[in-house]
Image: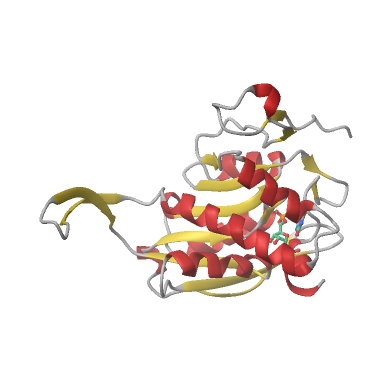
Amino acid sequence: NEKPQSPKQSVGPDYRPEKQKPTATVSTEVSFDNVHILPQTPQLIALLTMIRDKNTDRADFIFYSNRIIRLLVEEGLNHLPVVEHTVTTPVGRTYAGVMFQGKICGVSIMRAGEAMEQGLRDCCRSVRIGKILIQRDEETSQPKLFYDKLPEDIADRWVLLLDPMFATGGSAAMAVEVLKSRGVPEDRILFLNLIASPEGVANFCKKFPKLRVVTAFIDQGLDEKNYIIPGLGDFGDRFYTM
Ligand code: PRP
Ligand code: URA
């Protein structure tokens, strides 16, 4: 069950000579237009290196995960529609800018997805947040839906769906079905996650071609227990209990 190796690439700004840049494993590319991978900058790779390290303690795991989550939220917000908006500056000149138009909400897939809520709140004050409790069966890797509580007007909102780990894609697909059953159109859902597997992304994108995925990294694949490899282990355990 040999997986294709993830690409290695020199990491650093373009102006720096190649031989002065270290090489690192970077995200696998995928050919789906609706998947956006964060730029593989030295910062992002260093943050991912910290959270992937099995020797990173819980406090550091939380701190560095939160920094990546912030990058994901900022990038996710770029995919929301804006309209032209001109303002007058304190020196009496105008600036032709844009502003977001529309309503949003976050929806976290519990438990690990709740770790991304604060990053969303840091960018969108008083954002409404719904919850869907889905747990993956440890033996079969099949997702099971236990509970959901979503804003009543969710069908009128853009939804930022939050879950750090995107392995088989089963949990995320189940969450999307819940959102669609409440009237949220697929093209108004943005799924934000830290690490994805190529097979999870492929299955999911074929099923939901209009939904946008924003991820920090597409990894090499899945192991025999459907854990992402090289991955970072169990995100929920490392963030909440280890
Ligand atoms: C993890 C993770 C995702 C899911 C990913 O949650 O947070 O929800 O597994 O796997 P999948 O893509 O194969 O469905 P888990 O069910 O382990 O619960 P947790 O959040 O409590 O850790
Ligand atoms: N859930 C996790 O937390 N990690 C994985 O690698 C897969 C599912």
Name the spot of residue 72 as percent of width and height, x first. Answer: 54, 53
* Vertical order, 206 against 180 (above or below): above
Does residue 44 appear in the picture of this structure? yes
User: In what quadrant of the picture does the C terminus appear?
Assistant: bottom right
Rendered residue at 50%/34% (across/down): 33
Query: Is 8 in front, or is 102?
Result: 8
Q: Is residue 51 left or right of residue 84?
A: right
Can residue 168 be seen? no
Count of numbered circles in the view: 0
The N terminus, quarter of image? top right
Q: Is residue 124 shown left or right of residue 86?
A: right
Name the quadrant containing residue 163: bottom right
Task: Give the side of residue 187 with respect to residue 177, left or right.
Answer: left
Q: How is the image coloured?
A: secondary structure
Quadrant hosting ligand 2: bottom right
Instruction: Return the x and y of residue 192 as percentages of the image width and height.
Output: 56, 54
Q: Residue at x 41, y 48 (%)?
A: 79
Residue 72 vertical position relative to residue 63 in the rendered view, above or below: above
Residue 61 in which image quadrant: bottom right
Residue that appears at 72% across and 32% down: 22
Pick the front one: 20 or 153: 20
Locate residue 125, reporting x and y percent: 41, 72
220 versus 19 height, above or below:
below
Question: Observer-nearest residue: 166 or 46?
Answer: 46
Residue 35 is situated, as x and y percent measured from the top left of the image, at 54, 40
Q: Residue furthest left?
A: 92
**What's the residue at 28%, 58% (across, down)?**
101
